[in-house]
Amino acid sequence: MTVSKDDVYRALKNVLDPEIGFNIVDLGLVYDVEVNDGKVKVKMTLSSPSCPLSGTILSWVESAVRNIEGVKDVEIELVWDPPWSIEMASDEVKKALGMKY
Amino acid sequence: MKVAGSLATQFAPPFSLVLHYFIGSFIFNLISMISLFWYSGGFEPPVFSFSYAFLAHTFLLGSVMMTIFGALYQLIPVALEVPVFSFRIAYLQFYIYLTGILLFIHSFWTGNTKVMLTGATLLFFSFLMFLFNFFMSIRGLEKSNITARFLIWANVSLFVGSFIGLFMVFSFVFGFPVQNMENVVYAHLIFTLFGFVFMVIMGVSMVLLPMFSLSHKFRDIYINLSFFVMVISVFGGGFTILFFGNTLVYYSIFLMIASAVGLYLLQVYEIYRKRARRVRDTGTDIMFSSHFFILLFILSTILTPLSEKFVFASAFLLIFGFINTLIYGSMYKILPFLTWFHRFSSLVGKKKVPMLNEMLPEKLPLYQILISSSGVFLLTVCVFISVKPVFYSAAAFMTVGSLVFMYINIYVLKFKLEE
C-alpha cells in the first residue's frame, strides 16, 4: 500500500499536546512531511525548547506514523529554526487560546 | 526511530524523588502557617530574634527551599539539558536536610544551642551535597543561557550564605567574638534569601513563564540587566554589609536589590504581554499575579527608614505574599504534569487520558489563592495595628489556604481515569 502525505498528517492529528490540549498539526508544530517508498520523514518543532514532554511527544509521533499501513521506517527531525510561534497555529487553536487574529 | 535534535526528557528524575521534596514542603508550609498563631502579641522589634528565626526558617528552609530542591532536580535536565549527576545523592540529601531542619527549628523554639549546632551542621552538609550534585551536573553544560547563569550564581550564593549561617551558630555556641552580629545576620539574609532563593526564582521563571503562557518574541533586556544588578547587589552588597554594615549601607543595598527585582518584574510583564495563551489557565494566572506582591514589597522596602515595622511588612509581602503564592501557582502546573507523566503518558493512544488542566479541581485553586492572599494582606495590616481578632483571622486564612493547597495536591496525586 502506498503511503501519502495526507495519511501521515491525518495520523499526526491524533498526537495531542496534553498541556495545551490541541494536536500537533493544528498547533503548527509539524513543519514538513516527506514520504519516499514507505519511509517517512517528519520535520517538526515543539512549543518550547524546554518542553518537558519532548521525548514523550516524539515517541507518540513515531508510534502514530508507524501504525499507518505501509510505513517501513520513520525519521523525525526536531528543529528549532524557525522557532515556533502562535502565528503558525490554525485559526481554531488561536481562537481557543483567546488570541485576536 | 531516528531522531535528530535535542531532547530534554531522557534525564528526568524518578517521580518519588521529586515527591519526597514536594510532600516535605507541603507539610512545612502548613506548620509555618499554624505557627503564626503563636505571634498573636504582634510583631515588635528586634527583627532578629530566635522567635522570628523559628518562623522564617520553618517557612524558608522547610517549605520554600524544599520546593526549590525538588523542582531543581526536575528542572535541571529540562532547563539546562544536562542529566542530574546522582539521584542517590539527591535522596540522601533529602533525609539529611529534613533531619537538619527539624533539629534546627526545634532549637529556635527551645533555645537549645547544642541542638542548633547539630541541626545547622546537618543543613550545611546537605547544602554541600546539593552543590556538589549541581556543579557535577553542569560540567557538560553546552550552552549558557540566562537561567543557567542565575542558577550558577544562586548556588555560589547558597554556599556563602549557608557558611555565614553556620558561622553564626558556632559563634552562639562557642562564643566567638563577633563585632556586629546584625551585619552577619543581614549578610546571611542577603546571600540565602536574595542570592539563592530569589535568583533561582528569577532564572527558573524565565523557562516556566514563557513555556506555560506560550509567550514568544519577547525582549529579554530587562532580565539581563536584572541579572547584572542582582549579582552585584548580592555579592558586592553582601560582603560590604558583612564588614562595613550600618543603617545607610543596609538601606542602599536593599534598594539595589529592589531595583534588580523591579527589572525582573518588567521582564515578567514583557512575557505576560507577549503571551499567546490568553484564556484562563489557573496555575499560570496565579504565577503571574503573584508578582503584584513584589510591587508592594518594593514600596514597603522604600519606606523602611520611617519605621522598623516596614521590615516586617516587607518580609511578609515578599515571602508569604510573592514567594508562597508563586510556589502555589507553580505547583498547580508542575504536580499535574508529573502525575500525568508518571501515570498516564504510557496510556496515550490506548485509553482516553486527561488533559493536564482536567486534573485540578475546578475553581478550588483560585479560591485557595484568594483565601491565602487575604491572609497575607491581613497579616501585613497586623504589623501596624496590633488587633488580635484581625491577627487570628490572618493566621486562620493562611492556615486554611495551606490546608486547601494540600488537599488539591492530594487530589492531583490520586487522580484516576474514569472507567
Image: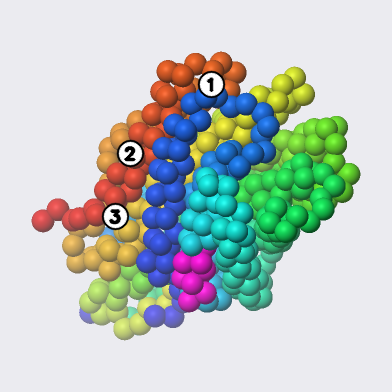
Q: Locate residue A59: give its quadrant.
A: bottom left
Tag nearer the camera, 3 or 1: 1
Measured along the vertical axis of the image, is residue B313 above or below residue B149?
above
Q: Read off the chain for label 3.
A: B
Q: Helix, strand, or loop for circle 1?
A: helix
Q: Quadrant of the N terminus of chain B?
A: bottom left
Q: Quadrant of residue B414?
A: bottom left
Asked if residue A57 is positioned above or below residue B313 in the image, the reply reads: below
Which of the two discs, 2 and 3, labels the residue nearer the N terminus?
A: 2
Whole-percent x, y for residue B226 in the image: 73, 44
Chain to which the residue tagged by mark 1 belongs: B
Q: Nearer the viewer, mark 2 or mark 3?
A: 2
Residue B163 is a magenta residue? no
SS at circle 3: helix
Residue A37 image position (x, y, % from top left): 35, 82
x and y, in percent, of residue A72 in the image:
31, 83
Query: How far apart, in angstroms, are the residues tagged by discs 2 and 1?
Result: 23 Å
**Residue at 41% across / 23% down in the picture?**
B393
Residue that mark 1 sits on:
B382
Give the extent of the magenta segment.
B88-97
Q: Which scheme is used to colour this image of the protein?
A: rainbow
